[in-house]
Image (spheres, helix red, strand yellow):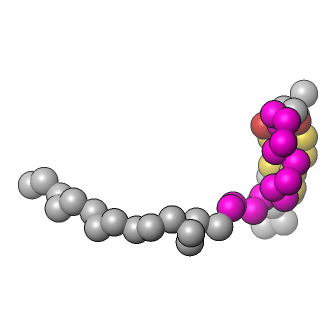
Amino acid sequence: MVKCIGIDEKSGKIKLSRKALIPKPGGADAEPEGEAPARDDRPRRPRPPRRS
C-alpha cells in the first residue's frame, strides 16, 4: 500500500509514499510530521580541511 502525499500541479505527477504508512515506534508522536527537529542546541565544531 502507498499513501498519496500530493500532486504536482505543473506536471500532474502523483507523489506517493510507503514510509508515510509505516507505524512509528512508541514516543515518536511528539514530533509533527514533515518538520525537522531544531538542531541549534548542538555545539558546532570546525570541519577538518579537505584532502586534495
Task: Name the residue located 29 percent from the left edge and 67 percent from the top edge.
Answer: 46
Give coordinates of residue 34: x percent, y percent. 78, 58
Task: Name the residue located 27 percent from the left edge and 63 percent from the top edge.
Answer: 47
Give coordinates of residue 6: x percent, y percent. 87, 55
Whether residue 14 is visible to the viewer of this picture, yes or no, is no
Give coordinates of residue 48: x percent, y percent. 21, 60
| Quadrant for the N terminus in the image | top right
Q: Main secondary structure of the magenta part?
A: loop
Residue 39 in the figure: left or right of residue 52: right
Using the rendered view, name the quadrant where residue 11 is placed: bottom right
| Quadrant for the C terminus in the image | bottom left
Judge whether 19 appears above or below 14 on screen: above
Task: Name the residue located 75 percent from the left edge and 62 percent from the top edge.
Answer: 35
Whether residue 49 is visible to the viewer of this picture, yes or no, is yes
Task: Name the residue located 17 percent from the left edge and 62 percent from the top edge.
Answer: 49
Using the rendered view, name the quadrant where residue 12 is placed: bottom right
Q: Which residues are magenta?
A: 24-37
